[in-house]
Every structure is written in C-alpha cells, then in structure tokens.
Amino acid sequence: MSQQDFETHLRPAYENYLKKHKSEPFVSLDECDLTFEEFLDRIKKVYSFPQMWGIDTEFVSLSDEERYKVFFSLNYETGMEFNPELKPDYDNEYWEPTPTRKVKVTYNNRTFEFYEKVNEMKPSDVQPKIGLSYEDVAPRKYKLVRENDGLTKAGNKYKWIEWNEDGTFQSSHDEPGLGRSFILDPHSMSYTWMTTVVTEIIEQREDYIKFKTSNSVYELFIQN
C-alpha cells in the first residue's frame, strides 16, 4: 500500500465532502474549506469526522514488540531481536520519535494502515542510552546464521555486550558469555545485528561458535 493508492482511493470521499460543504452548513468552522491534504490528515486524527463521509477510522495501540520494531526501523538500518526486558529509551530526544498507535482507515471495503504521527522533536546533544565504544578488531569475515529461519547477517567485526541490571550498556568483550548479547559490526551509533542475551554456548571452536539466546539459536562462522 502506497500513499498514492490511499489518496486515489479516498478521492471520492473528498469529492463528496466538497459537494456537501457547498450545500449544507458545518457545525464546526475548522471543518470548512479543507484541502485534500487537510481532509486526509483530519481523517487520521478526529474520531467523528470520518464517519460523516462513510469512512471508518480505528486507532490501535502498538504492542511493546510492534513499537520496539518501529523504533529500530526509524533509527537503524537493520533490526534487532525483540527483548521485552531491554526497552529503548523512547523519550530520549536523540532518537526519531516513535509512535504509540497505528491508524486503520477503511473506505469502500479497503483498509489502509498508518503509524500515528508524533510531534516532531528537535535533535539535541543528549547521547543515546546505549553509548557504545569499540576498538577495531583484525579484519576478518564473520557470518551469523539464525537456525530457525536461516536469516543471515555478515560483517567484519563483532563484540559480546554485557548489560547492567537496568538494561544499559556495561562493557564489551571479545569472548562469549552467558548473559551477554552478540553484536555484529558495532559502531558508536549503529550495528548490523544484535541478539538477545546468550543462555547457552552449544559449541565453540576457533572458526565457529554455536549459541542459544533467549529467542533463537545462532551459528557464527569465522573466516580467517
């Protein structure tokens, strides 16, 4: 679903609005003389307004996992496994604002979904909650494979992250350990992939590590 599809599908509702606007008075002045963009915006924000034009709008709160995924899609190029115990600092102004709800707009038996817009926040000098600093490691090729679905990520360096009890960064390590998270291609503000905490080291060799996390089983292949 694209924005263009949404606009095309809702155009007849707007035309109906224009016809009614000319022939019937409106109760509220702020509902008069709306442009098409303002009409669409109002549909996503006001409960009663869409019903006047045969549009059903539903506001649905995002689950913790959904909001978690949206946060990382807005702030990182790659994802991270959902971990309910390690929530991002959503209120930190450093990050792009993360919505708390999604809007479902249904018209003529077709439904469109949007994330509710969040008031824009200006970037500040506040640093993120997880401020990581890493030393460069020798240039090697690492491949991480998730066992259950074959998801594969590749990178040139990695670390094992140890956390404080409150979920904030404590330290990084070269060796795996229980309670640590694996992070691929770590940089000060980004990474390629990070797992939830390790619960078991299944197998470990010089060129291979198989480990289990809270959510998945991974294999790390190390090419010298």
Image (tube, rainbow, N blue to C red):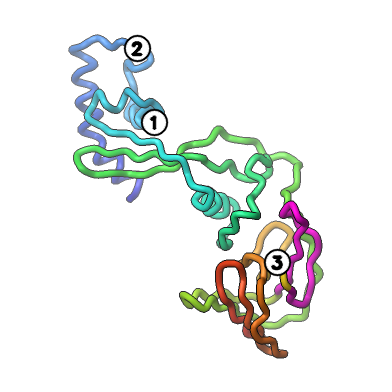
Residue 42 at what x, y percent from top left?
37, 27
For mark 3, give the secondary structure. loop
Pointer 2 residue: 28
The answer for how far apart the CA atoms under marks 1 and 2 are is 16 Å
The answer for how far apart the CA atoms under marks 1 and 3 are is 39 Å
Residue 192 appears in the figure: no
Residue 146 at what x, y percent from top left?
54, 76
Residue 154 at what x, y percent from top left?
59, 76
Pointer 1 residue: 41
Residue 195 at what x, y percent from top left?
62, 67
Residue at the limit of the structure toward the front, as seen here? 199
For mark 1, give the secondary structure. helix
Q: Is residue 48 left or right of residue 71?
A: left
Residue 42 in the magenta stretch? The answer is: no
The C terminus - image quarter: bottom right
Name the residue type under label 1: Asp
Residue 170 in the magenta stretch? The answer is: yes
Pointer 3 residue: 186
What span is in magenta?
A: 158-177
Q: Which mark is residue 224?
A: none
Task: Determine the residue positioned at 59% across, 81% down.
Answer: 219
Task: Determine the residue positioned at 20% across, 11% down.
Answer: 24
